[in-house]
Image (spheres, rainbow, N blue to C red):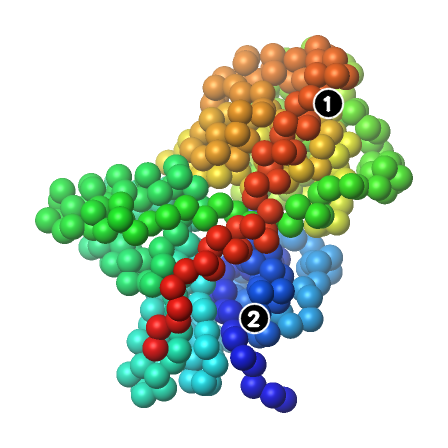
Amino acid sequence: MSRPNRRLVIVVRADPVICGHSGEARNLAEVALTRGFDDVRLLTWPVPALQAAGLPLKPLDRITPYSAGITVERPEPVGDYRVPDGRYLAGLTGRLVELLAEPVPTTCLSMYLMPHTAVVGDAVAAARAAGFAPEVRTIAKAVGSDVTNVIRSCLREGRFGAAVALFTTYLANDQVIAVSEYTRQEIVAAAEAVDAHCGTRLADECRARVTVSYPPIDTSAYLDLDPAAVDAALARRGLVRDGYVLFLSRVARAKGVHDLVAAFARSRARSAVKLVIAGNGPALEDVRALTRDDDRVVLLSDVDDDEKPLLMRGCAAYALPTKPEPDFVETFGIALTEKMLAGGGPVITTTTGGTGEAVGGTAIIVAAGDVTGLAAAIDRAVLELSADERLFMADRARAHALSFDRVRVFDELFATAPLQG
């Protein structure tokens, strides 16, 4: 087999994890094949490790295949039970060292600073120390949970050493990016807090170097949907067009799903439409218990990538009333833009975190945690908007969402300095 000319390695929690950033990795990988990378690899975790972590996962038998030229690697752990957590990291780092040992110009992109950026940094350092002299460029992308979970928890608990280590690992990369302007501002604010406590100068470097790279979306998967395919998908679920309000996301308190259940129960629209909650996550059993006796609420935990846009297209409204929680704040909202591309009823959301950047003023906005306002928004979307108003809102939403097309995002991200030896 001939040696590749250019390689892209993305270190990420990839499929089957239900997360917008696993979709980001897929989309960047697909575009890379059209931009001169002839070897594209997703370096990720073995499925048993993902299952053991309790992460929400897609049905394993219905994961959309990657294009030829994209290899998903799941390195096995190194060592035995006496190395409790480092075994999988050693497997990821070791495999990346092997790839860097080959004389192939390589770009390494890590999503989720902890632990993926550390894997890249350790592998590059090991390859250079061994004398392999890799021709490599590193890009680290800070996503939502990096800031709202990891960094904020360090600051809350006074664990400034961990915060310093995370920032210095991040800034050691050739290119540092954030998933939204909100995230970039949060990074700077967190760095300022660390500087104030530790006497470091991290914030100045973050201000100067961190740029925004929005999530890349395969817009073609949501445009020009076949009406017959939409109707068939809905029929299989016992649904009809404009006959349901849709929540399709990770089922978690921070996504506002409890508020949505309560708002739907008190809305006038519940007599005209159902509420469909599609997804998986830590709050699923809570929601199941809350809605057990309500035949107007449908729970779907097995929606795959092919069905998702069809359900989005057919809904009367899409509701994601996300709100800030101590362990999570929505730093963009990829599902919002996917819904905006698919068309159908309007989006209902909040301006938590970076959602305003995602919807761009094209959604029905409610205050986070305002159940009464959310019920009124559902009634407005379902019962009060005219057909012309719905069409106008859908067209504006789609025009904004097209700015996140994966080709455009890829080209802007990779229009940077050459590889470093």
Whether residue 289 is visible, yes or no, is: no
Q: Bin the neighbour count of mark 2 within 10 Å (Cα to Cα): few under 14, some 14-19, many 20 and up.
A: many
Q: Is residue 156 above or below residue 24?
A: above
Answer left or right for 168 relative to 1: left
The residue that label 1 is drawn on is 391
Picture disc at residue 179: none
Identify the image quadrant of residue 126: bottom left
| Dot 2 amino acid type | Phe
Residue situated in front as seen by the camera: 249 or 414: 414
Identify the image quadrant of residue 284: top right
Q: Bin the neighbour count of mark 1 within 10 Å (Cα to Cα): few under 14, some 14-19, many 20 and up.
A: some
Answer left or right for 7 relative to 268: left
Assign the C terminus to one quadrant of the image. bottom left
Whether residue 129 is visible, yes or no, is: yes
Answer left or right for 151 relative to 142: left
Q: Residue furthest left?
A: 199
The residue that label 2 is drawn on is 37
Q: Position of residue 210 (x, y in %)?
A: 33, 49
Element marked by disc 2: loop
The residue depicted at 77 percent of the width and 17 percent of the height is: 387
| Dot 1 amino acid type | Leu
Residue situated in front as seen by the camera: 101 or 213: 213
The residue depicted at 52 percent of the width and 19 percent of the height is: 366
Q: Position of residue 328 (x, y in %)?
A: 42, 39
